[in-house]
Image (cartoon, rainbow, N blue to C red):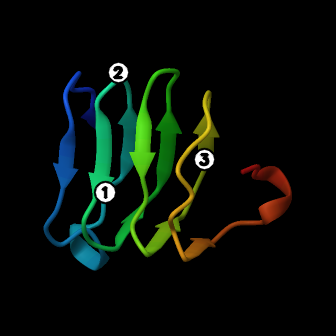
Amino acid sequence: TVYFDGASAQAISGTMTSTSAFYDVVFSNSGTKTFSNNASTTDVVINTGATVVAPSILTIDGDYTKDVSWNESAKVLFWSVALSSKSM
């Protein structure tokens, strides 16, 4: 699991797809977390107080859990599991 929990802004960059994809990602605290490149992950958790700016393409292979609104800047959001269990 990768935690982005800084109280100040955090830029998330680099290769984040294919063999460099995240497994589980958890966002917490007040700093805005901004993806600068497309990303893939298994599970995403956005806790209360966190602000996440998504990349153009975000692939989620598992669960998406949010306690707050998220900046849905992602132009394309992929799930590799049934969408019936997901909510935006």
Give the image quarter of residue 2: top left
Residue 22: numbered disc = 1
Please state which amino acid type lies under the numbered disc 2. Answer: Asn
Judged left or right of residue 78, residue 30 is: left
Residue at mark 3: 64
In three-dimensional space, the C-alpha distance between marks 1 and 2, rounded to whole angstroms, equals 20 Å
Residue 1 appears in the figure: no
Q: Earlier in the sequence, mark 3 or mark 1?
A: 1
Q: Residue at x 62, y 38 (%)?
A: 69
How crowded pointer 1 is (Cα within 10 Å; few <14, some 14-19, many 20+) is rated as: some
Q: Residue at x 52, y 51 (%)?
A: 71
Front disc: 1 or 2:
2
Give the image quarter of residue 26: top left
- Rendered position, 21 above or below 47: below
Q: Residue at x 38, y 43 (%)?
A: 25
Judged left or right of residue 86, residue 52 is: left
Q: Nearer the viewer, residue 2 or 57?
A: 57
- Rendered position, 39 above or below 66: below
Residue located farthest toward the left when viewing the structure as drawn? 14
Residue 16 appears in the figure: yes
In three-dimensional space, the C-alpha distance between marks 3 and 2, rounded to whole angstroms, equals 18 Å
Residue 52: x, y in percent?
A: 42, 45
Residue 29: numbered disc = 2
In three-dimensional space, the C-alpha distance between marks 3 and 1, rounded to whole angstroms, equals 14 Å
Label 2: which secondary element: loop
